[in-house]
Image (cartoon, grey):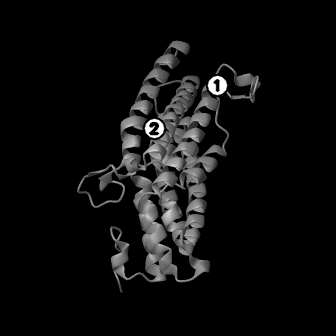
Amino acid sequence: MADLNLWNPGLAGLGVGLALATAFFLGMVHGITPDEHTWPITFNYAIGSYSVRGGFRAGLLFSLAFTLQRAIASELAYFAMSDFLAGARWNFAVYIVVGAVMAASGLFILRKGRVPHLFHSHALDHEARDEPAALPRYMPLVHGFLAGWGTGAFAIIVYTVLAPAMHHAYLAFLPGLLFGLGTTVTQMLLGSLFGGWMARRKLDGRARVYVARKMAGRTLSGGGVSFMLVGALGLVDPGLASLSWTTGLRVHNLAHLGVGLMLVVILLVPIAGYAFWKSVREARQRFPASP
């Protein structure tokens, strides 16, 4: 029997069972490594929930929608759509869409639940005008489904190696499904940790809610604009996708520092750090009783 090979599954002589096991464990690794559709995104929703349970739910909802997308894309890849899905311009177009969703989510929070109309604003929660709003619970679902259409090393393996290993069209969705479920396992765990981290900040109840939502709103807004800018640049010059630096690590997403990872590390992490610092400072001024 062939051995599980997460680095180069194509060398393993994949049968259906081994291909599905490979998909699941690759999904778990994917959920841990940072990219534009794993924990750097669910972090914002988990932080905004300011609890272990809320963070768990955010990770679950985001990843379930991601799982549905991967199952659909895996089926499409079986019918020779993998070249289209892995195209550089396609990926940068996804960046723009995902960035727009991030920015809209962030602005919803920061505008205290007011959503812009053509000539006026409407408050969804009239009692919460003075506080940052809570995002609708369905937003991680929307974001997870859209973000999943981006492609990287893991997606290419699912589309070009694991989906064809099914040999039957009616099974072709399974690698994407198992990959998404593997991602879901780690995303729920990480979401719980992020939500718990926020809950343990030395702030009283109202201040903690304020910091959590403000931080999430600012990070989503700033990150969303960054995603859209990188996506627009990539559409103008698709060669941007070829920029990468080799690390020597034999772990997908970490073996090469490409545009997606650099976008997260260089832009999203500093934005999140600044958002946390500024939000805590404001909370301590707004709620003097907080430590």
- Can residue 141 be seen from the camera position used here? yes
Residue located beneath label 2 in the image: 197
Q: Which amino acid does label 1 sit on?
A: Arg
Q: Where is residue 108 in the image (x, y as percent from the top left)?
A: 64, 31
- Can residue 179 be seen from the camera position used here? no
The one nearer the camera, 162 or 241, is 241
Q: Which amino acid does label 2 sit on?
A: Trp
Q: Residue at x 52, y 19 (%)?
A: 283
Residue located beneath label 1 in the image: 111
Q: What element carries label 2?
A: helix
Q: Where is residue 242 in the image (x, y as percent from the top left)?
A: 35, 52
Mark nearer the viewer, 2 or 1: 1
Q: Position of residue 222 (x, y in %)?
A: 49, 31
Q: Is mark 1 on a helix, strand or loop?
A: loop
| Residue 152, label in figure | none
Q: Residue at x 44, y 83 (%)?
A: 15
Disc with the residue nearer the chain's start (2 vs 1) = 1
Left or right: 235 in relation to 132: left
Q: In which quarter of the image is residue 135?
A: top right
Crowding at dot 1, Cα within 10 Å, few <14 / some 14-19 / many 20+, comes out as some
Would you place residue 41 above or below residue 219 in this image?
A: below
Q: Quadrant of residue 112?
A: top right
Number of numbered discs on residues:
2
Q: Which residue is drawn at 59% across and 57% down?
A: 64
Q: Which residue is drawn at 50% across and 74% down?
A: 163
Which quarter of the rendered picture does the N terminus lie within?
A: bottom left
Left or right: 239 in relation to 192: left
Crowding at dot 2, Cα within 10 Å, few <14 / some 14-19 / many 20+, comes out as some
